[in-house]
Image (spheres, helix red, strand yellow):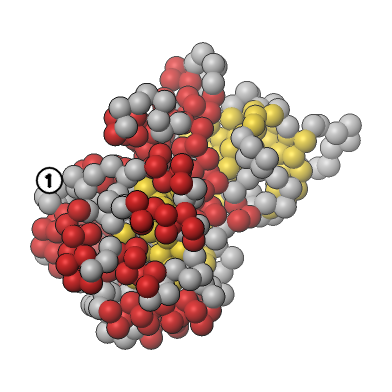
Amino acid sequence: MIRFYNGRVLRFGGGMRMTEDEVWTDGGRIAHVGPKPETLPVFEREIDLKGDLLLPGFKDAHTHTAMTFLRSFADDMPLQDWLYQQVFPHEAKLTPDMVYTFARLGIMEYLSSGITASFDMYVKNDAYAAANIDSGFRTVICSGLNNFDKDPGDIEREYLKFDALHELVSYRLGIHAEYTTSPERMRYMAELAHQYHEPCFTHLCETKAEVEGCVERYGMTPPQLLDSIGFFDYGGGGFHCVWMSEEDIRLFAEKKLWAVTNPCSNLKLASGVAPLDRLAAAGVPLAIGTDGAASNNALDFFREMYLASVLQKVKYEDAAAGGADRVLEMACVGGARAMGLSDCDDIAPGKCADLVVLNLRRPNMQPLHNIPRNVVYAGSKENVRLTMVAGRVLYENGEFFIGEEPEKIYERANQERKRCFR
């Protein structure tokens, strides 16, 4: 058992609130949340928070982890040119060893940013799952079926395999995007959703050109098209959701589909600003993702939270828009629920011990007026003191505990980079 004491605890059940409870973990679960009892059990470790903040870890609800291999490689390009001229050709060169190494690198960046789980859509999923298991990190794999896949049936085989592979790995159905996937393959994915009663996810309404192209091809926007074939009959959602019509928003609200915003990537690729306040007002559930390091270029959740909030203020010309409390809930709770990780959405007995300690004894956190809002508006990676996943401390005070020395991962990543771009 591990004991956290003498600090502040941010809880979300029944509304966001801060307490001074003790939190004990036992194995991969939270065993106790409450005042210090008169008699204490024997602990494996006792962590004095010294007034710091303990909160549920951030959930990266859309990413492509191994895309670290393209970080700062093809910058300052329009999305379609970036995707078809740079990303797809180089992704075709990736080997399982490359994906393993570059995923390990991405996981390190997640941990140093207070992220405890990722919702990943990429390639070579055997290698990717191994990287997460070996690191002790939690991930949800999302299938990215598209026209480049040789056998659509691999998706069903992956679903059955990875959903039962390991406690840290689960699987969700999805396609890469409408514009990369044939109608036959989209219908196949909808059939799988019906067969297994599973939600489906996809890149959706990321750019104006994407939406216009879909309307030209099918006479419908991407959400309307996918809904018409039963793709969303068991839930799911879309990544980006920038160019959403009023009908699209109503559809998402009625079916409680998740809209996962990726503000840094959408800005860098000039895709636009997602209408988060309109979506929230309509009742659409929201979460936050980083997207991949090829388009971001960082995997930094503090940047994402800040931009998710302040971009709404600019978009709606209203300083009250993009409330920080809602953004923090999107980061900690919304992402968990979008990913199907309902046991990771709060600090409460029986929940997963996926926790982050933020150091409040830093200049950017002082004075202590409103701590949750300060996390969104002033927080940074320098405040991440500790990151725990499934009861294991994987990052603490700048050190990683993921089964391999960082320098070895960096060295291997640069060797693999040379092989890929040779």
Percent x, y for residue 321? 40, 30
Q: Residue furthest right?
A: 38
Identify which residue is drawn at 41% across, 33% down.
Answer: 322
Res 81 quadrant in image: bottom left
* Quadrant in the picture for the C terminus: bottom left
Percent x, y for residue 21? 73, 32
Q: Is residue 373 above or below residue 165?
A: above
Answer yes or no: is residue 140 visible: no
Identify which residue is drawn at 64% across, 31% down.
Answer: 17
Name the residue nearer the viewer: 255 or 179: 255
The residue labelled by disc 1 is 76
Residue 373 is left or right of residue 301, and the answer is right
Near mark 1 (Cα within 10 A), the count class, few <14, some 14-19 or many ≥20, is few
Name the residue nearer the viewer: 42 or 201: 201
Name the residue nearer the viewer: 186 or 317: 317
Percent x, y for residue 42? 81, 42
Res 420 quadrant in image: bottom left
Answer yes or no: is residue 162 visible: yes
Q: Is residue 13 above or below residue 291?
A: above
How many numbered discs?
A: 1
Identify which residue is drawn at 49% across, 79% down.
Answer: 194
Residue 59 is left or right of residue 77, and the answer is right
Q: Is residue 360 above or below residue 138?
A: above
Q: The disc labelled 1 sits on which kind of residue?
A: Asp
Identify which residue is drawn at 56% across, 35% down.
Answer: 357
Callout 1: SS: loop
Percent x, y for residue 336? 53, 52
